[in-house]
């Protein structure tokens, strides 16, 4: 597993991380036993993955709780990213952080993010930023930032706060955020790429007849058909050396502004496909093809998340 430095934080992270939204989250992702969840986390660690992304609302806190159990005796081997959301007041931040620390069985969080905050919270004027700076001084957090979905949001927070980390929506089908990558790199802001497989479409396992439940039931029939057509247009990325998952992750990792990518994991095969994406690089020719595909098919008419 290759590693990169998370912006100007000095924190070394695995190129491929572990998205833990699905841990303990039967409502959106199906059942997974505690034993299976902990096994997957340990297996990821054994294969060189050290970056784990979670949030207090993932599985009602169960994701953090399971990670805490899995990290017992291994806290110094992992980098943990969690979030605070909905209420962005300093008081709620402290309450949310203390609850996360308890669940994670840790006395510090490596990185904490404002979870999809309203745009007005990105200009640095909210008192929550003073509280975040205090928490850094106290050693409760090592770095902070936000989880956002657009280059406009990215640039607002880069220019107006001391954030060192941004988690951003970025994949083959959603490339708009790349417009802010050069500025993020210039300012030393590490980028965590979220939704790298477009909620499963870029795993290649869905088609026009696929049926969805849980959080994926948000897609209309029209959106499903369009995504399948788009998927067919990029089938050239799969060959003897890479499957669709590996191609999707390698495309993201071809951007040096990206520090790590966080695909979700539900089983050992998915974990293997995710982590082996770090074994090879995507050619500049294929990267250019995928950029051109997005500019032609999606830039002016994006598909909804």
Image (cartoon, rainbow, N blue to C red):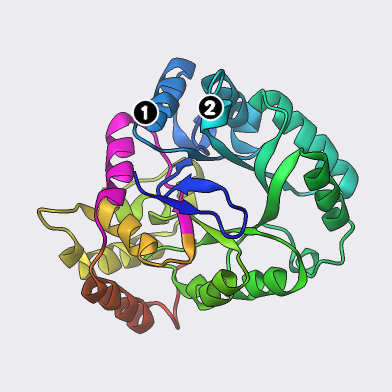
Residue 172 horizontal/vertical position (percent): 36, 66
User: As rendered, which of 183 and 177 lies closer to the eye?
Assistant: 183
Residue 165 horizontal/vertical position (percent): 62, 57
Q: Nearer the viewer, mark 1 or mark 2?
A: 1
- Left of 63 or right of it: where is 160? right
Q: Is 269 part of what is drawn in magenta?
A: yes
Furthest-left residue in this view: 240
Q: What element does badge 1 sit on?
A: helix
Q: Is 129 part of what is drawn in magenta?
A: no
Quarter of the rendering containing residue 161 = bottom right
Q: CA distance from mark 1 to mark 2?
A: 21 Å
Point out the stretch of residues depicted in magenta: 259-281
Q: How many marks?
A: 2
Residue drawn 17% across the image and 58% down it: 238
Q: Which residue is mark 2?
A: 24
Quarter of the rendering containing residue 187 = bottom right
Residue 151 horizontal/vertical position (percent): 58, 74
Quarter of the rendering containing residue 68 = top right
User: As rendered, which of 145 and 202 lies closer to the eye?
Assistant: 145
Counting other residues with Cα less than 10 Å from the Cα at mark 2, is it few (<14), some (14-19), or many (20 or more)?
many
Tell me which numbered mark, 1 or 2, is placed earlier along the sequence.
2
Identify the mark at residue 46; answer none if there is no mark.
1
């Amino acid at each position: 597993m290759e590693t990169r430095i998370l912006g100007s934080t000095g924190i070394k992270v695995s190129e491929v991380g572990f998205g833990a939204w699905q841990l303990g989250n039967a409502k959106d992702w199906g059942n997974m036993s505690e034993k299976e969840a902990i096994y997957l986390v340990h297996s990821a660690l054994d294969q060189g993955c050290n970056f784990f992304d979670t949030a207090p609302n993932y599985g009602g806190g169960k994701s953090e709780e399971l990670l805490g159990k899995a990290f017992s005796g291994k806290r110094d081997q992992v980098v943990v990213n969690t979030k605070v959301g909905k209420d962005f007041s300093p008081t709620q931040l402290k309450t949310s952080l203390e609850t996360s620390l308890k669940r994670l069985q840790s006395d510090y969080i490596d990185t904490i993010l404002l979870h999809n905050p309203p745009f007005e919270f990105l200009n640095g004027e909210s008192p929550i930023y003073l509280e975040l700076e205090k928490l850094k001084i106290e050693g409760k957090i090592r770095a902070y930032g936000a989880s956002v979905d657009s280059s406009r949001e990215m640039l607002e927070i880069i220019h107006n706060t001391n954030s060192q980390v941004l988690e951003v929506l970025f994949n083959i089908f959603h490339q708009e955020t790349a417009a802010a990558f050069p500025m993020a790199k210039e300012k030393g802001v590490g980028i965590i790429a979220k939704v790298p497989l477009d909620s499963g479409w870029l795993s290649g396992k869905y088609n026009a007849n696929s049926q969805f439940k849980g959080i994926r039931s948000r897609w209309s029939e029209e959106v499903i058909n369009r995504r399948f057509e788009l998927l067919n247009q990029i089938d050239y990325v799969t060959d003897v050396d890479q499957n669709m998952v590996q191609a999707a992750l390698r495309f993201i990792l071809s951007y040096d502004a990206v520090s790590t990518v966080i695909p979700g994991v539900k089983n050992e095969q998915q974990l293997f496909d995710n982590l082996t994406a770090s074994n090879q690089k995507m050619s500049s020719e294929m990267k250019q093809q995928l950029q051109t595909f997005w500019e032609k098919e999606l830039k002016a008419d994006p598909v909804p998340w």
